[in-house]
Image (spheres, grey):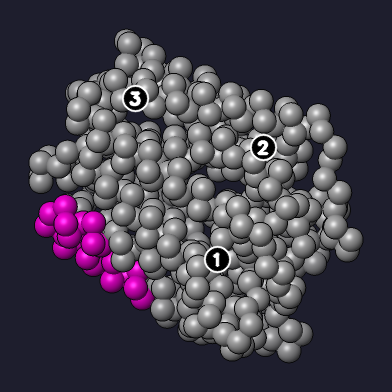
Amino acid sequence: MPPVTPRAPASGPSPAVRTRTARPAASFALNASVLATFLAASSAPTPLYPHYQDAWHLSALTVTVVFSAYSLTLLLALLTTGALSDHLGRRPVLAGALAVEAVSMVLLASADGAGALIAARVVQGAATGAATSAAGAALLDLADPRRPGRSALANSIAPVGGMAAGVLASTFLIRLAPAPAVTVYAVLAVLFTAQAVAVTFTPETARPRPGALRSLHPHLAVPPAARRALLAAGAGVVAVWALGGFYSSLGPALVRLVAPGAPQEAGGMVFFTLTAAATVTVWTLRRAAPHTVAAGGSLAVLPAGALTLSALHGAGLPALYGGAALAGTAFGAVSQGALRMTLASLDEQDRAATLAAYYVLSYLSMSLPAVAAGAATGHYGLGTTAHAYALTAALLAVASLAALGVSRSGPAPRPRQGTPRPDTPRSDFAHTGTTCLATPRNESP
């Protein structure tokens, strides 16, 4: 990783800005709902993939390309627009992203083939990348000193909870509503439009400053204080995010392979099981030691893969759903533990660059292996691909356990002067939970 260019500490909202926040509780709830709704929309297409495959005769590779088009565009948006709201303000960036997201829902509803679906997902990924940064930053702006850790926990729960809610809502609409490939996105488009209007009436929580264009330049680096933790947990991060990508893109197809007579909504419920388990895990382990959490999550990858594969050998859907639940537990534990380890000894000005590096690794791990699995499915079949995928994830998890063991046996990194220790609840970063990508990043004009 390239060395980090020192940056001035990112400043939070000034007292003058905070005093203009007439109803901070309402603003906090709105920003948390925006974060959750964006991630709900990201997972809403998952139960519809079998419908698209049947209607347009799509291959497994095409389905994974549709999925990865969203993930890779989101990644690019995070690297370029992650600090934009620090310069323009949270409100205009959020309102613009919500408007673009509503347009992407219209494009998804009107898609008539794979090309249109991919284009719509690209637009959606760009809007989601900009919005998650701005909404997460607004949650940090609205942190309440009387409730330490609330903002970080909201940044942890809202994404995985939103993904679970999106799959569940989409599954029910497929079952109950006419034209499900239109109804799902029409409902979301109305919701995003309403949120865009609501955001325009909220007070600004950040003081706009020059440097917006320069902030769009991609920046990726990890300071020395975080490298050891990220390297220790990196293999586990790759394993769990790759599992998330597999279940999200090929989970419905796996259900059809295991139980050909299962109803269509059963396919989407596999990814719901994973995200719901991840949500519960993040909440349950929010105060546990991050190193232990990351190691336990890596260990859970092994039975998750074994249980999923047993479904292909006669154990059926209960084993498949059990494997998804264990994969979700691993996802929530490793993601939370790795981020808390990485952020524990960072100065404020280094957090944005470190988070960007973490999510580059995460989204690449989620999208590229899924595309490879889609290509392999076309050549070798889904069953063979699932075995190879589970074995690879297991090897990565074992490597993560070994690296975490070596890291724990070595000397603990010494916090920098003036930086709170991880067990000191003086900030949302030090207190608990996974943080979002939205840590303000200070750029020169």
Q: Secondary structure at mark 1?
A: loop
Q: Residue at x 32, y 16 (%)?
A: 312
The image quadrant of residue 357 is bottom right
Q: Residue at x 24, y 29 (%)?
A: 377
Say whether disc 1 or disc 2 marks the residue closer to the N-terminus: 1
Rendered location of residue 369, percent (x, y): 38, 38
Reply yes or no: does residue 116 show up in magenta. yes
The image quadrant of residue 397 is top right
Say whether disc 2 or disc 3 marks the residue closer to the N-terminus: 2
Mark 2 residue type = Ala
Reply yes or no: does residue 135 show up in magenta. no
Mark 2 closeness class: few <14, some 14–19, many ≥20 residues within 10 Å: many
Left or right: residue 101 versus residue 52 is right
Mark 3 residue type = Ala
Q: Secondary structure at mark 3?
A: helix
Q: Which residues are magenta?
A: 99-120
Q: According to the image, label 2 marks what residue?
A: 232
Q: According to the image, label 1 marks what residue?
A: 219
**Does any portion of residue 355 appear in the rendered image?**
no
Callout in the foreground (1, 3): 1
Say whether disc 1 or disc 3 marks the residue closer to the N-terminus: 1
Q: Residue at x 57, y 34 (%)?
A: 236
**Does any portion of residue 330 appear in the rendered image?**
yes
Rendered location of residue 132, percent (x, y): 50, 64
Q: According to the image, label 3 marks what residue?
A: 386
